[in-house]
Structures are given as structure tokens and as C-alpha cells.
Image (tube, rainbow, N blue to C red):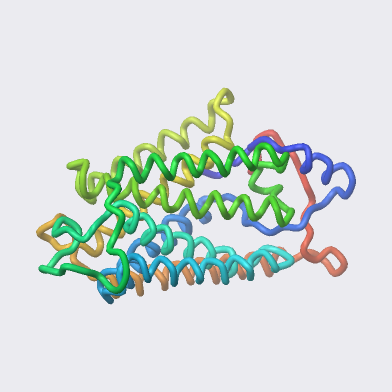
Amino acid sequence: MERTDVFSGPNAASTSRTTGSVLKKLPEVTLAFWIMKIAATTLGETAGDLFAQTLKLGYFLTTIALFLVFVVTLIVQLRSRRYNPFFYWTVILSTSMAGTTLSDFMNRDASAKYLSNGATALGWGPQGLGLGYPAGAAILISLLLAVFLAWKLSGMTFQFRDIVSFRGEALFWAAILVSNTLGTSMGDFLSDSSGLGYAGGALLVTGLLAVLAALMKAPVVPNVLLFWIAFVLTRPLGATAGDFLTKPVAKGGLDLGTAGSSAVLLAVLFGFMAYAHVREQRAAPRPGEEGRTPVTRPADGP
């Protein structure tokens, strides 16, 4: 999906008229963007499971620790003066990891269905709320809609390329955290409860993403809606792909382990980060224009 021709709020229009340029804090939405998003969310699944399950820290402790990591990475991103691929994708990764364990904590419990190898507990603290995937998804969908409602009422732009203010970026990252948590619930439901299995769930989500890509050619469907649906759906794709890589062969996985899978995915993600950083350096503005990029409104461009 290379187009994100989404609507702008009044603040973005005002910024365009008065300054003609905005601080660039978020990446261009290209094919490489979506590849990195899927890699980051798949790594978020395997790394979250690595800490919570393989290292037996449990969902509760791991969620608290990873949420603190998210806060630290978010502060670094918000304080940055311009787009930095390492800052941005580190926040995406931290929301994916935190979303993985938060979803597990909400939806699972300490029953044998979720704790394998005869384990009766994971780490210290509550073992899970046991809400189940439907109830957990309903809560998360409500939270995501509340974030978007607050975003709409704020008058800030939904257009990805024009999010330039601190408040707009904070709303953006709140939506990302909730959407990644929701996507984890959807992915786990497809893998564990739908009967499709890991590969079947991944194929289903891939098919839905292909439909969204086709709908981008239909002018009646707002691209802002398509973008956020795709953003949510890439998370269950990462969740099912992560489970497929790490779960036992008897359960339909490849049994590559959380540690090995996470290491490979981390290398892939950092490789793309480095590539994006080199591209940003080559496209750096001339002296006196650093950190700014012209605001354009092409009808068909990203």
C-alpha cells in the first residue's frame, strides 16, 4: 500500500497556509514501510513470548516492564526534532512487544490451555484476567474508537504525513499501542481458536490486506480508514507469523524457538532501519531547512 491520501484536519490546513512547511516526524508510507511494520510486529510477538513464556517472567511483570520501555522510547521519539528511523521503529517495536503481553494478560489465564509443559504459573503476580479473545477484542475496539473520537474532537489531522504537533503525535502513538494490542488478540484468536491454525490465519489476513490494497483504487472509500485497518491487520499477521515460527510442530508451527526467531527478525528489522537511515541522510535538506519538508497535497501521492 503506497498511497495514504487521507483527509486533513483544520490545523494541518492552517499550518500549510501560514508556514508552507512542517517538521517531518513520521516516515513515508511505501512498500518498505509495510515490510518493516510486519517485521516489527512479528518480532514483537516472538520477543514478547520470549520474555513472558520462555524466560517465565509472566504476562504481568513483562507487560509492566515493556510498557516502561514503550514510555522511554516514546519520549525519545517525541523529543526528536525530525524523523529518525531508529527512533520511530523502536517505538513501533516496543508497542508490539507490550501489546503482545498485554493482550495475553487480558485474554488468558493459568489453565493448562495456555500454560504448556505442566506449568501452573508464569512469573510473579496475576497470571491473567481470562477475559477470552471476544471480550478482550471488544474492550480494545472500544478503546481504539475512543482514541479516534478524542483525535477527531481535537481537530488534529488524521493524515499520516501531516502529523506534526506534540498532541497529534501523542494521539497517533496512543492509537498505535491500542491497535497493536487489538491486533495481537485477533491474531491469537485466528491461531488458537478459529481452527485455521497459524498458516491459515496468516493467509486469511494476507488476503484481507490484498483486498484493502485493491480498495485504495476506489474513491468512495476514505484512504484514512483503509490505512488504519491495514495498520491493525498487519499486527495479527505478525502474531500468526510469529506463532508459526515459534510454536511446536505438533501444534502446526515450525518450532524455531522464540530466541532464534527474535534474533533473525531483529537483524532483518535493523537492516531495514539502516537502509531507511541512509535514504534519509541522502535526502537531507540543505542547510537552513533541516528538519522541514514541503507540504504538498497531490491527489494520488502518499
Q: How many marks?
A: 0
Residue that appears at 68% across and 69% down: 281
In front here: 190 or 17?
Answer: 190
In front here: 78 or 285?
Answer: 78
In front here: 42 or 264?
Answer: 42
From the viewer's perspective, tell me whether residue 156 is left or right of residue 89: right
Q: Position of residue 83 (x, y in %)?
A: 67, 63
Q: Is residue 26 above or below residue 132?
A: below
Residue that appears at 41% across and 40% down: 209
Residue that appears at 49% across and 44% down: 143
Q: Is residue 184 above or below residue 258?
A: above
Residue that appears at 41% across and 71% down: 266
From the viewer's perspective, tell me whether residue 264 is left or right of residue 148: left
Q: Position of residue 267 (x, y in %)?
A: 42, 73
Q: Answer yes or no: is residue 175 visible.
A: yes
The part of the image, by quadrant, that contains residue 282 is: bottom right
